[in-house]
Amino acid sequence: MNDSYLNFANSAVGAKLADALGLPKPIVLDRYKEGQPVIKGSLLIGGGSDAPLLPTLAKIFKSIGVQTVAPRHLPQWLPLANQAGLMSGRWGVDDQPGEKVKALVFDATGLTDSTQSDALYQFFHDAARSVLPCGRVIIFGRPPEKCANPRQATIQRALEGLTRSLAKELKRAIAVQLVYVAEGAEDQLESTVRFLLSPRSTYVSAQVIRVGLPVGAGGTPSDWNKPLAGKKVLVTGASRGIGASIAEVMVREGATVICLDVPQAQPGLNEIAAKLGATAIELDIGAADAPQKLVDAAKADGGWDVIVHNAGITRDKTIANMKERFWQMVMNVNLSTQERINDALVESGVLKSGARIVCVSSISGIAGNMGQTNYALSKAGVIGMVQSTAPVFAKHGVTINAVAPGFIETQMTAAIPFAMREAGRRMNSMSQGGLPVDVAEAIVWFANPASSGLTGNVVRVCGQSLIGA
Ligand SMILES: NC(=O)c1ccc[n+]([C@@H]2O[C@H](COP(=O)([O-])OP(=O)(O)OC[C@H]3O[C@@H](n4cnc5c(N)ncnc54)[C@H](O)[C@@H]3O)[C@@H](O)[C@H]2O)c1
């Protein structure tokens, strides 16, 4: 679906008119092109006086090939960077800001008391105007629930408020995230840092991500451009929309894909499977025998590595007007069947070691939505399923995470009446809808073999939608 206002606001006349009338001015988002570097431009690093994550970050930045600069408040950075063989320089002279940068990264893992927050002020006050459009900000903290004492937990939890406010203030499509890294999980960070610094995360902002100790087999991909080489990936609902994009991005990342959709979707399914060199499975996942059929298919295929539960339906009506069968249909396809499939795949052992399950929730499941009691129930249930099964599946070496898309430009959202569609599109920090590929990029990050430290996460792909924030 074409967002004609986005094009207009980016034309010379449109930009002037938008300024004069005080209308939103969405900018064209950077999106990843195959083979491009993770980040184009330098990165400004900051941290508290105790910043224990810096040595890990220096190694990751070296691996990514990022050029870093540091303010004078962080004298420990230059020796660390030198040690890691990383290009680094000073940022700013005589209290004047330095060059414009593409990213800000702040190590707040060492903050143990609210009285230490000045370090955050100093860094973000000095650097706020120096981030390029479509830039990135990452703040690293420790998970409050694992902190040693209430004071430490308090300042670490406080970082959420800073993250969400910066994401609203910095504008110009600059995305801001908070990553809580558990003690001992530092070497699980690289796939997340790569994703969050790159244009792959263009429509993800103001998210809180938890990286923990590794689950199951994983490891560093030999080629970061093809991390899914040799992996077999099932994508449900793959004949169109977000599912087709997930299948496409999985193939781009090196995976062998199995595209699944209902028999009625056969023409689109066959077309996408032929285009991607994928296998097609026609199956209604809501059918009672679907879990067993998938176990059999996975067995015959020598096991699967990644399952993406993308298939989903809506049957919108206010609850007073809703037919019981629409209630049941939505709950079955969007939630109950996925629970049955996960249990069957995990228990039968057809998922390979280090397998990944990625689910698709929705901001409706977080915020609720008029006319969507059934859909919101099912999508909130997906979040419940991810959080409650993560520790259970971890014992089998399987991770489970979810993405929760906001307004994504698909056939589904094209059918929304004009006024509501415009409101949905603009009511977020990017002032525009996301594209299916934005959801797909977040899913391949979870699917990466190096993402073993990610489980039980729910990450919104919504441009910091104001709804449910
Ligand atoms: N488009 C958005 O803005 C948006 C926002 C939030 C969440 N989502 C979620 O993202 C996912 C994909 O959405 P989309 O916009 O691409 O929708 P879509 O309707 O274009 O695609 C859904 C696909 O799932 C398939 N499917 C439905 N029931 C099935 C079943 N029983 N068995 C097998 N396949 C089945 C459909 O045939 C279709 O190909 C859904 O789970 C949806 O709820 C979408």
Image (spheres, helix red, strand yellow):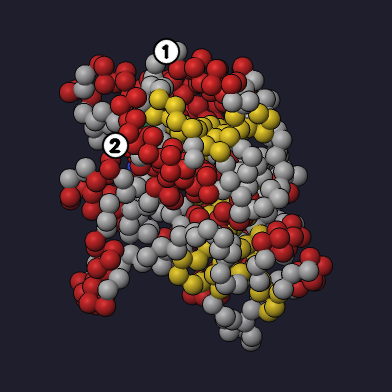
The residue located at (58%, 84%) in the rendering is: 96
* Residue 302, quarter of the rendered image: top right
Q: Is residue 100 left or right of residue 82?
A: left
Q: Is residue 7 left or right of residue 49?
A: left
Kind of residue sitting beneath label 1:
Ala
Along the polypeptide, which appears first: circle 1 or circle 2?
A: 1
- Which mark is in front, 1 or 2? 1
Q: Is residue 429 above or below residue 20?
A: above
Provide residue 32's location: percent of width, then percent of height: 49, 59
Residue under label 1? 288
Most foreground residue, 249 or 343: 249
Most foreground residue, 242 or 442: 242
The residue located at (37%, 52%) in the rendering is: 434
* Residue 103, quarter of the rendered image: bottom right
Query: What number is the disc on residue 457?
Result: none
Residue under label 2? 369
Splitting the image into four quadrants, where does ligand 1 fall? Answer: top left
Q: Does the beta carbon at disc 2 come under 8 Å from ligand 1? A: no
Q: Mark 2 Cα within 10 Å, few/some/many (few <14, many 20+)?
A: some
